[in-house]
């Protein structure tokens, strides 16, 4: 449209647009066709499309949505190009899934890999950095699982789809408190592990009757907290 043809008082153009009324009936048919095409596409790409998606699967879904949106709203665009785009995306997705089953290296390169974020009660800082995940974000996820002490975590995995898996020790172990530092009263209620301190950055444990004055031997930080047992 030309700039001089745009008026804020033109409510018919704003609400209805410049398409004839018959297009609304056609839009119903287009919407039904695209809806069925999306269902078929998700079915052909596997049951994973109904669960937590990997980045590759999310890209496929966004691409399908982008291709369908134009044909749904534009009367001058046909539906056949949408079918072609959907066939390419579905074929590409199935090819990746097939190749990922044959090659672990390909699966790791394209679909990402599992990362160990916590190992035997200690934070794996390089893995956290690679996951673009802060300590507080990880602690929040652990607290949602009822964890208050990092020492009780045997393994915390970040799966390829971004979900978290957690394995804990059968018996309580000393470790770093993961309660929010702002909640001082709740942190004070935690039972302390006598003679042990935890690095506030990586959760490394060191013995001592008072907070160490030297940097952490594992990460080099000097941020010590009393280790807790619960």
Image (cartoon, rainbow, N blue to C red):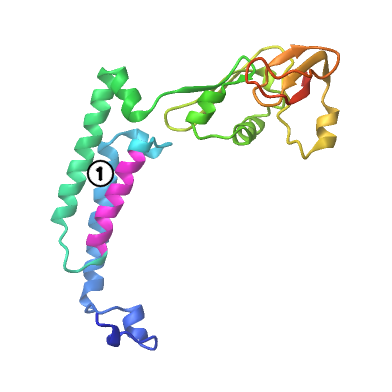
Q: Is residue 15 visible?
A: yes
Q: Position of residue 132 (x, y in %)?
A: 50, 35
**Magenta highlight on residue 61:** yes
Q: Nearer the viewer, residue 69 or 217?
A: 217
Residue 163's place in the image compared with 86, above or below, is: above
Residue at the spot of label 1: 40
Specify whether residue 173 is in view: no
Q: Residue furthest front?
A: 214
Rendered residue at 35%/80% (across/down): 14
Q: Is 18 placed left or right of 123 in the picture?
A: left
Name the spot of residue 71 as percent of width and height, x first.
Answer: 22, 61
Residue 185, percent from left and from top: 85, 36
Q: Nearer the viewer, residue 143 or 194?
A: 194
Q: Tell me where residue 147 appears, x and y as whole percent.
A: 68, 26
Q: Can you say which quadrant of the picture contains the N terminus? A: bottom left
Q: Name the residue located 33 percent from the left edge and 48 percent from the top edge.
A: 62
Determine the image quadrant of residue 103.
top left
Q: Quadrant of residue 146?
A: top right
Q: Dominant secondary structure of the magenta stretch? A: helix
Write down the region rendered in magenta: 57-72
194 shown above or below 78:
above
- Quarter of the image where one finds residue 27: bottom left
Helix, strand or loop at label 1? It is helix
Figure label count: 1
Q: Quadrant of the C terminus?
A: top right
Position of residue 216 relative to residue 88, above or below, is: above
Residue drawn at x 40%, y 24% is 113
Mark 1, residues whose alpha carbon is within 10 Å: few (<14), some, or many (≥20)? few
Q: State yes or no: residue 143 in magenta.
A: no
Q: Is residue 221 shown left or right of residue 60?
A: right
Residue 118 located left or right of residue 42 = right
């Amino acid at each position: 449209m030309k700039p001089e043809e745009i008026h804020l008082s033109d409510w018919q153009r704003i609400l209805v647009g410049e398409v004839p009324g018959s297009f609304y009936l056609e839009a119903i048919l287009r919407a039904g066709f695209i809806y069925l095409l999306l269902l078929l596409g998700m079915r052909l790409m596997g049951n994973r499309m109904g669960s937590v998606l990997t980045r590759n699967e999310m890209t496929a879904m966004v691409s399908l949505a982008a291709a369908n949106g134009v044909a749904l709203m534009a009367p001058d665009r046909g539906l056949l190009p949408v079918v072609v785009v959907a066939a390419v995306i579905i074929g590409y997705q199935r090819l990746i899934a097939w190749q990922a089953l044959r090659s672990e290296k390909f699966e790791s390169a394209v679909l990402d890999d599992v990362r160990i974020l916590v190992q035997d009660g200690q934070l794996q800082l390089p893995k956290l950095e690679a996951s673009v995940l802060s300590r507080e974000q990880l602690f929040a996820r652990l607290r949602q699982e009822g964890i208050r002490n990092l020492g009780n975590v045997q393994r915390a995995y970040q799966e390829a789809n971004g979900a978290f898996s957690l394995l804990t020790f059968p018996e309580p172990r000393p470790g770093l408190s993961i309660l929010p530092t702002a909640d001082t009263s709740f942190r004070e209620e935690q039972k302390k592990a006598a003679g042990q301190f935890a690095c506030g950055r990586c959760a490394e444990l060191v013995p001592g009757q008072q907070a160490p004055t030297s940097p952490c031997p594992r990460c080099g930080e000097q941020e010590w907290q009393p280790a807790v047992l619960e």
